[in-house]
Image (cartoon, grey):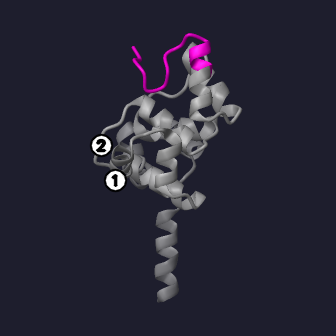
């Protein structure tokens, strides 16, 4: 019986790929039937759960991510606990704290419910360029200043 329980638990943990969900959505007879049939595969973990999982996977200590992100220590820990709201710029700062590539930064923005980086926006292009080249946050700030674009965490309108 123990083996049966493990199989059920493992099956519940495995989620369908996004492409499989798209295919199921467009073949569904109604939106309701799709939502009902795929309930367990829908939704994203909270941002704090996502960044804590990232730390675990990368064997990273939140304190180091917070320091590299240039975020005040207590505020950073509140983000990891999920007790603070965050802005898009704060998520971008965390991306640099995680030493993220563009794909990881996009995932962080998605999990935070923020708009993703878009190459038609000059500032987003510069930030994406910096992420791709593994710039630090400070190097990225210098690039943005050189290009006369708003700094990350600065006055963004």
Which part of the image, by quadrant, shows the C terminus? top left
Q: Residue furthest left?
A: 83
Nearest the eye: 94 or 41: 94
Q: Are marks 2 and 1 in contact (CB under 8 Å)?
A: yes
- Residue under the image location 54 percent in, 39 percent down: 95
Residue 139, by quadrant, is: top right
Q: Position of residue 28 (x, y in %)?
A: 47, 40
Looking at the image, is 22 positioned above or below residue 130? below
- Residue under the image location 38 percent in, 31 percent down: 87
What distance separates the C-alpha of mark 2 from that of mark 1?
8 Å
Q: Which residue is mark 1?
A: 81
Left or right: residue 145 compared with residue 2: right
Q: Residue furthest top?
A: 148
- Residue under the image location 28 percent in, 48 percent down: 83
Q: Secondary structure at mark 1?
A: helix
Magenta span contains residue 118? no
Which residues are the magenta region? Answer: 143-157
- Residue under the image location 47 percent in, 46 percent down: 66
Q: Which residue is mark 2?
A: 84
Q: Position of residue 39 (x, y in %)?
A: 39, 51
Q: Position of residue 3 (x, y in %)?
A: 52, 85
Q: Position of residue 5 (x, y in %)?
A: 46, 80
Looking at the image, is 13 positioned above or below residue 75? below
Magenta span contains residue 156? yes
Residue 120 at least partly seen? no
């Amino acid at each position: 019986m123990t083996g049966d329980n493990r199989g059920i638990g493992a099956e519940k943990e495995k989620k369908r790929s996004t492409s499989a969900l798209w295919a199921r959505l467009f073949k569904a007879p109604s939106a309701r039937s799709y939502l009902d049939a795929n309930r367990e595969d829908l939704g994203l973990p909270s941002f704090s759960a996502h960044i804590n999982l990232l730390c675990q996977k990368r064997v990273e200590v939140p304190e180091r991510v917070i320091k590299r992100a240039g975020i005040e220590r207590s505020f950073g820990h509140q983000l990891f606990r999920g007790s603070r709201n965050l802005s898009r710029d704060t998520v971008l700062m965390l991306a640099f704290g995680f030493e993220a590539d563009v794909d990881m930064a996009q995932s962080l923005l998605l999990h935070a419910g923020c708009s993703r980086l878009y190459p038609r926006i000059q500032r987003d292009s510069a930030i994406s360029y910096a992420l791709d080249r593994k710039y630090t946050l400070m190097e990225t700030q210098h690039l943005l200043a050189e290009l006369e674009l708003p700094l990350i965490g600065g006055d963004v309108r």
